[in-house]
Image (cartoon, helix red, strand yellow):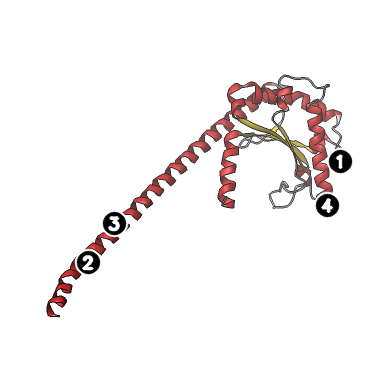
Amino acid sequence: MVLKKKRNQEEEPGFWISFSDLMASILIIFIMLFVYKLVEYQANISQKEQQIQELTSTRVKIVKMLQEEFEKENIDINIDPNTGAIKLNESILFDTSKSELKKEGKDFAKKFIPIYVKILLGDKEVRSQLSQIIIEGHTDDVGSYMSNLRLSQERTLSVAKFLLDDEFNYKYKKDLQKYITLNGRSYSEPILDNKGKINRNASRRVEIKFRLKEEEILLQIQNKLETGK
């Protein structure tokens, strides 16, 4: 009995040393996995930052080209310097609560649309990165959401019909059909004044904007992160 007890006492240190080695190995594995994930995460961040820089660079280029061409042709038009969105007030295109495009609206479209389409579809580099050309209708908050939704949708359809109609001819018109998208937004995106109140006159508008392929990818990534899918 004495010999057996003594033997157990001699074996115990070896057991604990082996257990310590095992725990140390597991810890090293965890550290290596953490470092790998950290490097992978940083690489993804760098890639996204590069995509954003490229996207911003392309958008800035397009906005600059549009501004220069419109200025050259003496066309006074509201272009968002950050997004490139063109905002057309209701009074230019439609009568109040109407969706039929006015003659003045058609004449104004004939001035700037050929230039707009030429820059987006005529420039090979820009066109290769273009995903959509979007026409969005917006209203003020007078009346119900659904009645304004219908009006905003009918107005975008009215603009699109004219842009693709036989009476309006310009270069790259057929190509435009591949990119054009229509959205009626009702009063979901009103324009506010400096006091935070809805500016109804400015809110009644049609916006023409473009979306780039890189932007589509970033939106998909964002949606996946938000939904977890």
Q: Quadrant of the image for the N terminus?
A: bottom left
Q: Earlier in the sequence, mark 4 or mark 1?
A: 1
Q: Is residue 30 above or below residue 8?
A: above
User: How far separated are the C-alphas under marks 4 and 3?
Assistant: 67 Å
Q: Which residue is mark 3?
A: 25
Q: Earlier in the sequence, mark 2 or mark 3?
A: 2
Give the label, 1 or 3, closer to the camera.
3
User: How far separated are the C-alphas under marks 1 and 3?
Assistant: 75 Å
Residue 61 lies left or right of residue 147; in this view the side is: left
Instruction: Give the SS element for disc 1.
Output: loop
Instruction: Give the SS element for disc 3.
Output: helix
Give the label, 2 or 3, closer to the camera.
2
Q: Earlier in the sequence, mark 2 or mark 1?
A: 2
**Image x and y of residue 158, in percent:** 82, 33
**Mark 1 Cα within 10 Å, few/some/many (few <14, many 20+)?**
few
Instruction: Give the SS element for disc 4.
Output: loop
**Image x and y of residue 51, in percent:** 51, 36
The label number, if any, that marks residue 157 in the structure image: none
Picture quadrant of residue 151: top right
Q: Which residue is mark 1?
A: 96
Front residue (pair 5, 140): 5
**Mark 3 Cα within 10 Å, few/some/many (few <14, many 20+)?**
few
The label number, if any, that marks residue 144 in the structure image: 4
Question: Residue placed at 73% from the left, 28% from the top?
Answer: 177
User: How far separated are the C-alphas under marks 2 and 1?
Assistant: 88 Å
Three-letter code, disc 4: Ser
**Image x and y of residue 156, in percent:** 79, 36
The label number, if any, that marks residue 15 in the structure image: 2
Give yes or no for contact between labels 2 and 1 (Cβ–Cβ under 8 Å).
Answer: no
Three-letter code, disc 3: Ser
